[in-house]
Image (cartoon, rainbow, N blue to C red):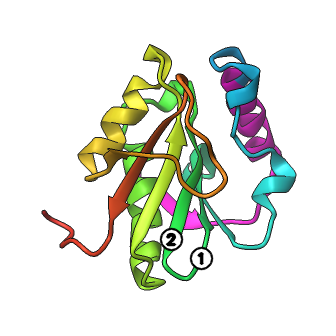
Amino acid sequence: MTITVEQEGVGAPDMVALLQLHLEEAVANSPACAVHALALEGLRAPGITFWTAREQGDLLGFGALLQLSDCAGEIKSMRTYPTHLRRGVGAMILGEIIDLARVLELKTLHLETGNTPHFHPAHHLYRQFGFEWSGAFADYTGSEFSRFMKLDLGKPADS
């Protein structure tokens, strides 16, 4: 079966259910002051582009890009249904996000994530795409819990 990744509006019932799971797990695995996952209305904000991965209409995962400025973006709300982990869903979505960032001529992609073992698979995925550890960006402040990563889009894609 073929997985398709496409830009999609925010609000389909299956997407809302996965977002709810994403937010519940963020709260369960993060200190209250370090939950930066966007709720539904945040994903509808101007400057957000949202993708879903589907297989025969079934939602497998989603991700979003927030354009911070003319030269920087932030990866937001990457999530795959637990039953579809390790199928490349996150990598497919992240690839689409990076492709659009390049089309938009962004110079840097940033992200904030947690620092506990729960978040280690995400760290691994981002590292595979060339993201490196970095300092806080935009309105974030550093903490023991938050980890920040960035991808320099000025480098060739295969470096």
Residue 85: image quadrant is top left
- Crowding near pointer 1: few (<14 within 10 Å), some, many (20+)? few
The answer to whether residue 96 is above or below residue 150 is below
| Nearer-the-camera pick, 150 or 9 | 150
Q: Is residue 98 magenta?
A: no
Residue at the (44%, 62%) spot, across then down: 109
Question: Image check: 81 left or right of 38?
Answer: left
Q: Position of residue 42 (x, y in %)?
A: 80, 54
Question: Image check: 111 left or right of 50?
Answer: left
Res. 11 mark: none
Q: Position of residue 37 (x, y in %)?
A: 69, 40
**Most distant residue in the right direction:** 41
The residue under label 1 is 69
| Nearer-the-camera pick, 48 or 18 | 48
Residue at the (47%, 56%) spot, across then down: 110
Point out the stretch of residues depicted in magenta: 1-26
Residue at the (55%, 82%) spot, across then down: 70
- Element at badge 2? strand
**Which quadrant: the C terminus?**
bottom left
Res. 72 mark: 2
Tags 2 and 1 in contact by the CB under 8 Å rule? yes
Residue 81: image quadrant is top right
Tell me, yes or no, if residue 9 can be seen here: yes
**Most distant residue in the left direction:** 159
